[in-house]
Image: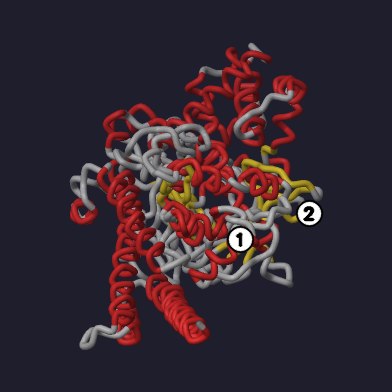
Amino acid sequence: TIEERVYGWMDQACTTKPTISTMTTTRPQKPQQQKPQDNFQRFETWLRENGAVFDALELREYDTPAVVHDNNDMDDVAEEKKEPSTTAAEDEKQEESEMRGVHARGHIPADTVCMMIPRRCLITVEMGQATPLGQTILNSDLDLDAPKHIFLMIYVLWDRKVNGSNSFFHPYYEILPRTLKNMPIFWTPDELKLLEGSYLLEQIADRNNAIRQDYNAICQVAPELQDLCTLDEFKWARMCVCSRNFGLQIDGHRTSALVPHADMLNHYRPRETKWTFEEDRQAFTITSLQGISAGAQVYDSYGQKCNHRFLLNYGFAVEDNREMDGFSPNEVPLELGVSTLDPLYAKKVEFWMRGEADALQAAVGGFADAQTLSVVMEAATKHHHHHSNNNPDGPGAPVKRVRICASNNENTRLLFSLLRALACNEEELKAITSSINDGAMSRALFGLTDQRMSLQGTPTFYRSCRDIRHPISLRNERAAMMLLLEIIGRSLAKYPSTLSQDIVDLMDEVALPRFSNDRHAKIQVRGEKEVLHHFARWARTALEVMDVIESEMRGDNGKSSFDSVIGEMEVDEGNNGTHHTIVRYCDDILGSLRRQEWKNIRRRAGMKKSSATGSGSREHQI
């Protein structure tokens, strides 16, 4: 997927135009015998000579990777830079560190434009399209993995090769990182091994394959690309662009751009600045959202993302990737499919695949949000025969992949819907898939009510396995939670270490130094396991609550009641115990199921009594 920062024009929060900071903090006096400017000094001089304003800011080089978020709390360690740290040997070769950050020269008040980069200093998609190579690519109508990124890359690679040191952007090119060893697609086999068990390994391989395919495809229509760069240089350019580009609206047109200097701000949340392209100024601007103290690092926010996206696209993983409300966007994918050993395999596969074409068409047609599109696309591309997490008996079943995080969001509800479909017995499957006329009696036995027509006009209760958003029965919900535990168990078994061991390992900053690839790999797999353990606890808790419900229905005395168990869970939630999503599921969803089961018991008892009464009347007549 194309990783771009959120469009800045959508983030405008101020109704009045902020003023540009004209801070004139005294700079160190130049020595009488001036030293030659280094690359970054030449870069800043180039920007100023072309109208850029950033007097309130200064670039700092870090001799060690201990970058601290200095916001009146020296213990609040910042998220890592996009650029990698280097070894001593590499530093000797490169003469300067690639570990830098942007800091405030003095106090920056809120609502201050602290950086303004004129349009002429931006590299845009359109500039890449205008090159001879870009024109060839445009005319060839190639199906490329990330077209906007490609054209930004093409401009950089073409300009550096053709114009060399005479390029207008030469000072910018000189400060770009020479290596991107922090990016997983450049990791060594030993470093990649630290991700064993993680789906990120497949994403890294996919990214490498996509870049290679793009390179080969372009070389087929434009052989001159081989004269501009090797495959490794093409990969370097791709990841430079991927980690640095901004999605902007310029002249009413959405585009992507490289913005010198602005792309050097490190990531931190909650965001402290906002950025946009201002048409009246014809410049890219960064504005403070709050006061920033003198000397503090000035941050950009790369958005609320799972660590796998930070690591794959920017080369770092956030140590504690949580929002202010405690929510963690870290995700892990679960793959689900119908077991080939299921006696209802054929019937379940038919239901499993029902509606996929409609869902994909709706998403592509713009009738679904980005999250839904992501889920639909992953499901659609996994319809080939695949060995799924819950199908250890061999390949053969279509697979759906769902990304889940510790939240009761749309993907969690989709996961539970799919689990309920997989857990159906024959009677339940018939009840939820049969037509209104044929299935009315079956659904009545489960306390289910009829719904309307499917998209195809066929009267069905659930038009697809994605729509089972409420429990079918107590038996089915229990089977679904047991299946979830099995899937999670298999996922956890793929990792060579446990979550508790990962937590202990991350306490050792000697063995796993901050900002190292080894540490980032460990942070990534720890985050995945935290999500898996969250859902394992969810399933176990649900099973325990269903035990209580069944105990109530049997009339067992002396056992805990449903209400008392939920009350204890709510107290535990207040003490940072049971996660609130689990409490709400047990109270709302299982509570609703409990009420429905009681209704079913009374209904069946009434039907039995009525039948007995009718039989007695007939005997009396005889």
Q: Residue at x 73, y 50 (%)?
A: 249
- In terms of sequence position, does the residue under pointer 1 or pointer 2 come before the other? 2
Where is mark 1, residue-wise? Answer: 461
Residue in the foreground of this view, choosing between 527 and 581: 581
Q: Residue at x 44, y 72 (%)?
A: 325
Residue in the foreground of this view, choosing between 188 and 399: 399
Question: Marks 1/2: CA distance?
Answer: 53 Å
- Residue 417's place in the image compared with 548, above or below, is above
* Residue occupying the far front of the picture: 622
Residue in the foreground of this view, choosing between 378 and 198: 378
Where is mark 2, residue-wise? Answer: 279
Does the image show residue 599?
no
Mark 1 or mark 2, whichever is nearer to me: 1
Measured as percent of width and height from the top left, residue 288 is found at 58, 65
Residue 83 falls in image quadrant: top left
Measured as percent of width and height from the top left, residue 233 is found at 51, 23
Residue 477 falls in image quadrant: bottom left
Q: Residue at x 47, y 80 (%)?
A: 615
4 vs 209, left or right, is right
Q: Amino acid at mark 1?
A: Phe
Q: Which mark is residue 436?
A: none
Measured as percent of width and height from the top left, residue 265 is found at 51, 51
512 vs 238, left or right, is left
- Residue 387's place in the image compared with 24, above or below, is above
Residue in the foreground of this view, choosing between 414 and 579: 414
Secondary structure at badge 2 equals: loop
76 vs 449, left or right, is left
Q: Amino acid at mark 2?
A: Glu
